[in-house]
Image (cartoon, rainbow, N blue to C red):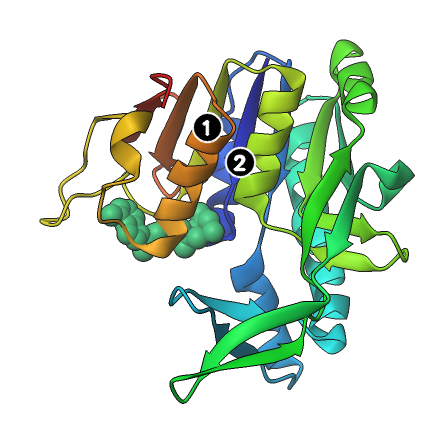
Amino acid sequence: MYVVKIGGSVYENIEKIVSDLPKNNRLIIVHGGAKIVTDIAERLGIKQKFVVSPSGIKSRYTDWKTMEIFQMVIAGKINKDIVRFLVKNGRKAIGLCGIDNSLITGIRKKKLIIVENNRKKLIEGGYTGKIKNIDIDFLRLLVNQGIIPVIGSVALSEEYEPLNINADTLASFIASKIGCEEIIFLTDVDGVLDKDRKMIPVIHTSEIQNMNIGFGMKRKLLEISRFRIPKAYIYNGLRPRPFSDPVGTVIIYDGN
Ligand SMILES: Nc1ncnc2c1ncn2[C@@H]1O[C@H](COP(=O)(O)OP(=O)(O)O)[C@@H](O)[C@H]1O
Ligand SMILES: [Mg+2]
């Protein structure tokens, strides 16, 4: 069994990605789509706020208006597009997010520490959360029936609110809990790049901590090693045949 994580950054190539998917049906697809959420929110005239954490990481602030769009875009538009192309290719697939059958429960971050004008500030947390639990038995049931679960990165909070969760974390969490040997991340670059923007073909997890890598990519590497995924691939999902003619990096877990 394996997990494929499709980043919002490669959504424009989704039809080609789906038609090139390996024929092995024992897989789970996880997707995010924050970039498309930002795009649609702006088209609807809802200004997106970004905040900076004390460690310097910039992220979107998910207020309620944004959360409404997040749910529509991730659980609706993107999720159903992926399922649509899967069934078009003769595959059995079902689209889900964490709300469906309480598949993914999460804990809302009630407060957030941010940095503004060089000063730390405590603000309302908005609708982002941490994963609490995933109903792995239910996913296993679907996979054993030959149905591909397609899961959007929305969780259900303890107060039954929708939550924005990180899709890289979700994919790694599922892979580790269900016992996958492999996970494939599709993103918009040719794998992990060095300072001269040359692709690094192989990385061992013990090297990750000391590597100087920008945030979107670092997050994937940290989750792969935190969840001890035996083998992960980071491939360019914008290529014409992302799986059968792959370009990218292999990450091997070496116990650290
Ligand atoms: N050293 C690096 N190698 C590759 N990508 C990097 C690196 N540092 C930062 N990045 C960024 O990480 C991005 C991928 O993460 P992200 O934007 O979150 O996309 P996704 O939607 O796939 O999660 C790349 O587009 C790239 O700009
Ligand atoms: Mg990302």
- Can the viewer see residue 249 in this picture? yes
Asked if labels 2 and 1 touch by Cβ distance under 8 angstroms, the answer is yes
The one of 147 and 64 positioned closer to us in this rendering: 64
Identify which amino acid the numbered label 2 is placed on: Lys
| Picture residue at 90% right of the left edge, 55% below the top | 160
Left or right? Give the position of 171 relative to 130: left
Picture layout, residue 190 above or below residue 201: below
Q: Position of residue 88 (x, y in %)?
A: 67, 31
- Can the viewer see residue 245 in this picture? no
Q: Position of residue 237 (x, y in %)?
A: 40, 39
The one of 182 and 24 positioned closer to us in this rendering: 182
Q: Quadrant of the N terminus?
A: top right
Left or right? Give the position of 121 relative to 157: left
Identify which amino acid the numbered label 1 is placed on: Ile
User: Can you tell which quarter of the image residue 202 is in?
Assistant: top left
Label of residue 184 in the image: 1
Task: Classify mark 2: residues with Cα within 10 Å, few (<14), some (14-19) or many (20+).
Answer: many
Q: Position of residue 219 (x, y in %)?
A: 43, 46
Label of residue 169 in the image: none
| Picture residue at 21% right of the left edge, 43% below the top | 193
Label of residue 5 in the image: 2
Q: Position of residue 62 (x, y in %)?
A: 65, 70
Picture layout, residue 233 above or below residue 125: above
| Picture residue at 15% right of the left edge, 48% below the top | 197
Mark 1 or mark 2, earlier in chain: 2
Picture layout, residue 180 above or below residue 34: above
Instruction: Report the Cα–Cα distance between label 1 and label 2.
Output: 6 Å
Q: Is mark 2 within 8 Å of ligand 1?
A: yes
Task: Classify mark 1: residues with Cα within 10 Å, few (<14), some (14-19) or many (20+).
Answer: many
**Secondary structure state at the residue bearing disc 2:** strand
| Picture residue at 38% right of the left edge, 67% below the top | 56
